[in-house]
Image (tube, helix red, strand yellow):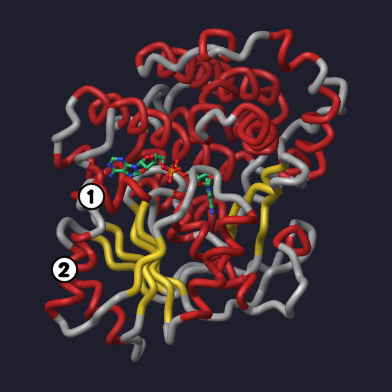
Amino acid sequence: MTISFVSPRLLMIGGGSVAKLAEVLAQFGLSRPLVVTDPWMVSSGTVEKALAPLRAAGIAAGVFSDTVPDPTDTVIEAGVAAMKAGDYDCLVGFGGGSPMDTAKAMAILGAAAPGVKMRDFKVPAQANRGALPVVCIPTTAGTGSEATRFTVITDTERDEKMLIAGLGALPLAAVVDFELTYSLPARITADTGIDSLTHALEAFVSKRANDEADEYALRAMRLIAPNLRTVYGEPSNAIARAAMMKGATLAGIAFSNSSVALVHGMSRPIGAHFHVPHGLSNAMLLPAVTEYSLNAALPRYAEAARAMGVATAAEGDQSAAAKLLQELRDLNRDLAVPTPAAYGIAPATWDGLLPTMAAQALASGSPANNPAVPTAEE
Ligand code: NAD
């Protein structure tokens, strides 16, 4: 089997590393960044943690801060206009997955001919070109977008979250500073943390799993599983925050070189139609999808349980996999993950949408990588 392995050319990981952004840019000969971020990052002063050291190094960055959660094609078009209006030589995605994905999508759309739309890059198309290199600085320990060859953009005309894949979405470099995550509210800490655990688990059980991605997935699970409850309950625990941040990046590398699967395939339509935060919709689905998939990849789920520390090496696969499932249910309880109904999505509102959502999930390609592949009716 031949494996193509991708990751950013430079990964700088460590507390306080955001202050070294100018050094990172200088290594690539870059000096005119447009920082892509969201309104909270500006109003809270968080983006200053990147901008102030840049100014000290004599770099005056532009700022595009109109990113929205689950970024839309219309925001990307506005971002491309801002990018083209200035003399920039790189984009810096600063924030959670939404600003990072916005920066990546701006690079991709910015390289396209006039009239080309974001939806023209939807999987199975390949988005291999970027107008400018992208450097990512995550502020959630979640999506791993800083290290993946993906960006997820909402098609506003069709209410569809589109997966866009290719080297054009792969950041040139990432600066991974766990100290940026101290300010996360407990809810976002939990949701984004489960997102990263889902990435590692889905990458590991995927039909596209391979030796190289496995190493990253297992390391990610070893880091995330014992620290997720800790960061939820003790937001200023530096050791746990550092482990979660590194785990999220490693999980990103894992699924970027394997794939995500059924949880993510089903999660995107929920996000598009009901605006449930991405990590939270993953969390709502993870135990049920795992239960559905378990017997199709029992040894893999069992090994994941051992990596997560919920089963021993001596334990048989059946018992270990059962413990994994129980752990996922317990995690949702301990992290107060609501059911869709408790979140305010009454069955009556999604009933009529189910066929569309099932079709969108299956069309995204991710479910085909799941150990067990459901029909639309399932
Ligand atoms: P997000 O970027 O949408 O941010 C959620 C909220 O958290 C925002 O209000 C933001 O301002 C706030 N926030 C972020 N960092 C903070 C901090 N340090 N302190 C306080 N508040 C903070 O959330 P996300 O979960 O990181 O990203 C979700 C998006 O990423 C979705 O669109 C999802 O589809 C996408 N995604 C992309 C990939 C990929 O590989 N490209 C992978 C998984 C998910």
Q: Position of residue 314 (x, y in %)?
A: 43, 24
Q: Residue at the location (22% across, 46% down)?
A: 44
Mark 2 secondary-structure assignment: helix
Front one among 65 and 17: 65
- Specify the quadrant of the image occupied by residue 33: bottom left
Q: Position of residue 288 (x, y in %)?
A: 63, 18
- What label does residue 180 carry, if any? 1
Disc 1 beta carbon < 8 A from ligand 1?
yes
> How many residues crowd around disc 2 within 10 Å: few (fewer than 14), some, or many (20 or more)?
some
Q: Residue at the location (25% across, 44% down)?
A: 181
Q: Residue at the location (68% across, 69% down)?
A: 127
Q: Is residue 368 left or right of residue 31?
A: right
Quadrant for the N terminus, please.
bottom right
- What label does residue 376 carry, if any? none
Quadrant for the C terminus, please.
top right
> How many residues crowd around disc 1 within 10 Å: few (fewer than 14), some, or many (20 or more)?
many
Above/below status of 273 relative to 287: below
Dot 2 corresponds to which residue? 52
Q: Is residue 70 left or right of residue 174?
A: right
Above/below status of 232 relative to 204: above
Above/below status of 41 relative to 115: above
Q: Residue at the location (61% across, 33% down)?
A: 271
> Residue type at mark 1?
Leu
Above/below status of 126 relative to 257: below
Front one among 217 and 231: 231
Q: Position of residue 55 (x, y in %)?
A: 17, 76
Question: CA separation, marks 2 and 1?
Answer: 15 Å
Front one among 150 and 206: 150
